[in-house]
Image: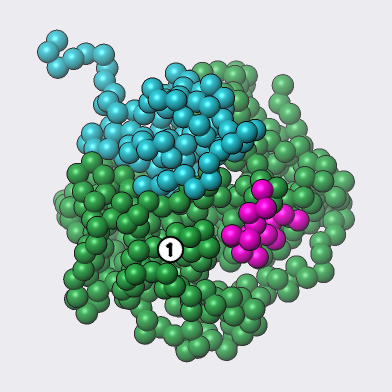
Chain colours: A green, B cyan
Amino acid sequence: MTDSVDVAVLGAGPAGMAAAVVSANAGLTVAVLDDQAVPGGQIWRNVEAAAARGDLGLFGDDYAAGVDAVANFRAAIVDYRPLSRVIGVESTDIGGDVLFVRNGKAGRLHAKRLIIALGAYERPMPFLGWTLPGVMTAGAAQIALKTGGLLPERPFVLAGQGPLLLLLAAQFRAAGAAPDVLLRLDDPGRKWSAGKHGLRALAGFSDLLKGLKWQRSLSDGVSKTVTHVAHLEASGGDRLEAVRWQTADETDGEAEAATLLVHDGVIPNAQLTRAMRIPHKYDVAAAAWCPEASADGQLADTEWAYVAGDNAGILGWAAATATGSKAGASAASALGVKATTSDDVDKRLGRARAVRPLLDALYPPAQAFTAISDDTIICRCEAIKAGSVREALAMGAQGPNQLKAFLRTGMGPCQGRMCAYTVAALAAEANGTALADADIMRVRMPISPVTVSEMSHLNETDMVLPTA
Amino acid sequence: MLRRWVEPKGDAAVRLTIAGQPVTALRGESVATAALAAGLQATRNAPVSGEPRAPYCLMGVCFECLMTIDGLPNRQACLVPVQEGMTVEPQLLRPSLGVSDND
């Protein structure tokens, strides 16, 4: 039997929890599906356990803000289903269905309204040697610290840029694990106060202060800091042994390394909205593909589905609680129920929107895709190098979708999560198109691998997934 | 790559077997971080090139942490919380169709 709710929320991070609380408090039946074991998303990962252990101080005020948010979520009357993997979504006459896997069984949940809040992930940054064990994202190491109490082994090299890198560096330092070598990928020529976005960003004054504080202490405890690194390379046999770099003014450097953490900002996790064939637009300032949606998050070309939080476009957790609330209220009102959101929703959103253009201008993606050497693996799953992609394009491959047939780029288990942006950029470069007009590879359901055993738990009538 | 800073003790300790070795993990962490803390270098070999791979994102995106957990292969170890008595194996061999090169 298919179970049924008024509102299905995908993701239990800041946006998903806010959406669930608002629609549940309006009296609607709400189910929340999330792939983690506990609520909080990535920013508030494991925050309940950290609070219980008395470890909150390590991670700063933004992390501590999750304690109340998670408590509010736990207190709301919500059918919370942790450890659920969403594999697809189908529209029906009224609303639609979510297909998911939980406890080794596929299931189908009918909902009148759907709120997608699947967050963001770190922008994949291909360079020679990035597939070596010992190289991981800075966010991954943060998750390992928050959940397992793990720290990077030394020698430890941290390479990257952006607001999240500043926060991560502060957290590692607080845990007594400042990097031995810090490679800054941002251009020091771009100043915080300068540029046309500075004045507007003053509306988010407290965020700027926080950033300046992190920025000032970024190199504390670090033995070597290198600025404006333009080229990065990891080397080793079966694991990372050394990191080499070159700065924009062509100064070379090298360091031994057991751990290399990289970070180049975050991009929306648009895998599901892309698989749903929602139109997506390339946001040039954010250098990211974002689903098209109305101001309250209703997705273009759908009656029933909304997007909220960083899934819609990167604005951070405070804005995500606001857009989550708005989507929850909007879904409620579409179902004829009045929902209340807190008074400062628009203020929070306005503040985040004021700062974002400055951040986008300060931290464009670090690496020009043209700088990826031919022998760099760009599709990790299928071990396909940039040179093969360029060759296939020169032979006449028309774009990312035809490249799948030529090379299998994006057809491994990650389904293009790691290579879609790079493949799009390489194709755009070969075709002489701007990224804003370029294609990104098509995503198909199921958006996460499913076993036959898991699928066998669906009823016969439930088996069909969208094919278009 | 990563080392244990907080040692799991008392109720927070979960005992499992990773690559044949007994391992004590922290309740609430994933199989992937437990494997890294246990000193496992590679969680799998890339099926196409055979080169060793280890978790890259730890949040369900990269699929580099695919491991065999309690006999079920290709599970995303970063999305599976550790449980008492689990048996976890890295996927170090290239998958085959059961036909050796000599047949």
Q: Position of residue A187 (x, y in %)?
A: 36, 78
Please report the residue visible at 24 percent of the width from the left and 62 percent of the height from the top: A255
Residue at 60% x, 25% y is A103
Q: Is residue A61 magenta?
A: yes
Q: Is residue A96 above or below residue A221?
A: above
Magenta extent = A53-68
User: Picture quarter containing residue B53?
Assistant: top left
Extreme-left residue of the structure: B102
Type of residue at label 1? Ala
Question: Does residue A433 appear anywhere in the picture?
Answer: no
Q: Quadrant of residue B19?
A: top left
Q: Nearer the viewer, residue B56 or A369?
A: B56
- Decide: is A444 above or below A244: above
Q: Is residue B96 visible?
A: yes
Give the residue pinned by disc 1: A178
Residue A454, image x, y percentages: 54, 22
* Chain of the residue under label 1: A
Magenta span: predominant SS is helix
Residue at disc 1, secondary structure: loop
Residue visible at 28% across and 55% down in the picture: A257
Instruction: Give left or right: position of B14 versus B91.
Output: right
Between A347 and A228, which is closer to the camera in this rendering? A228
What is the crowding at mark 1: few (fewer than 14 residues within 10 Å), some, or many (at least 20)? many
Q: Nearer the viewer, residue A421 or A158?
A: A158
A86 part of magenta stretch: no
Residue B20, horizontal then vertical, whole percent: 38, 22
Q: Quadrant of the N terminus of chain A?
A: top right
Residue A430, position in %: x, y?
23, 61
Which residue is found at the position 63% from the left and 61% from the top? A57
